[in-house]
Amino acid sequence: MKEPGEDGAAPAITRTSAIYERLRRDIIQGTLVPGEKLRIEVLRAKYDVGGTPLREAMNRLSVEGLCTQSEQKGFRVTPVSADDLLELTRTRCWINEVGLRESIARGGRDWEEHVLLSLHRLSRIPIVVDNSRMNPDWSELHRVFHAALLAGCGSRWLMDFNDLLFDCAERYRNLLAVMGTVRDVHGEHRAIAEAAIERKTALAVGLLNDHYEKTSGTLLRAIESGGLTGR
């Protein structure tokens, strides 16, 4: 028996893309927790979709490193670990250093305005809501700001890879049981943006790396203390 959407290519592609986006969002937001088994029958009922689009979506997610696959155990949400977080943070620092240096060297007035506008919008939104949980509106504007910093680099490939790294880091942030507000995160963002548009390359890169490493340090302490939900 054919599953819904298998008679025509366009409906099948649309269905697969839609379920891919939903699964991806649920993994990044922590709704599907690290290590959780992705059971086809459970997910079919939850998302009201056939098994074929689900498998295709999970194959895409496994390529991105957001879920794992084995012949014996099927698909699972990729676990979190201190080693993985350290590797992720190092890679983000490497990629962002290249992208930010290129943006500072190549970016014009439009790039500067994009950075400042994204910073302004981000500064108007609270980081946490509902008993110190991450504010999804802030998370989206946070993504836009960090993408804006690299937007002048001239490399679509770098930007696409940076988006994936951002999402993987966002998954760790969303797993924090309680979001702390001790850091002046907006102050850090402002300092990075100002150094970038003033073409102070070494300072901007150093501030951006420090920004990532501070977040990584908070998350590492949470991993060590069991403060990540879903572990």
Image (cartoon, grey):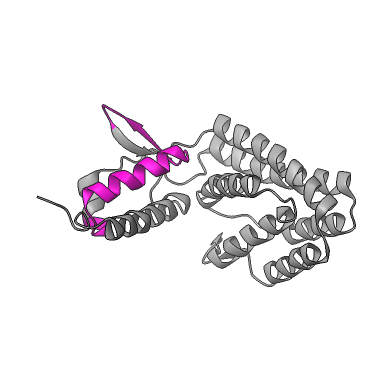
Q: How many marks?
A: 0
User: For this view, does 72 lie left or right of residue 173?
Assistant: left
Q: Position of residue 107 (x, y in %)?
A: 80, 57
Residue 114 occupies which quadrant of the picture? bottom right
The answer to whether residue 163 of the structure is visible from this angle is yes
For the point 51% across and 48% down, the residue is 171
What residue is at 41 percent from the left and 56 percent from the top? 21
Left or right: residue 228 compared with residue 67: right
Residue 34 shows in this picture: no
* Image vertical order of residue 152 relative to residue 64, above or below: below
Between 102 and 212, the one nearer to me in the picture: 102
Residue at the top extreme of this rendering? 72
Task: Say which of 11 and 190 sits in front.
Answer: 11
Q: Is residue 50 magenta?
A: yes
Q: Residue at x 66, y 46 (%)?
A: 215
* Region in magenta: 45-73
Image x and y of residue 116, in percent: 78, 67
Residue pictured at 38% horizontal, 38% vertical: 35
In the shown orientation, is residue 29 left or right of residue 221?
Answer: left
x then y, percent, for residue 88: 60, 37
Residue 5 highlighted magenta (yes or no): no
User: Could you say which quadrant of the image residue 135 lies in?
Assistant: bottom right
Q: In the shown orientation, is residue 146 left or right of residue 54?
A: right
Q: Quadrant of the C terminus?
A: top left
Residue sitting nearer the eye, 123 or 66: 66
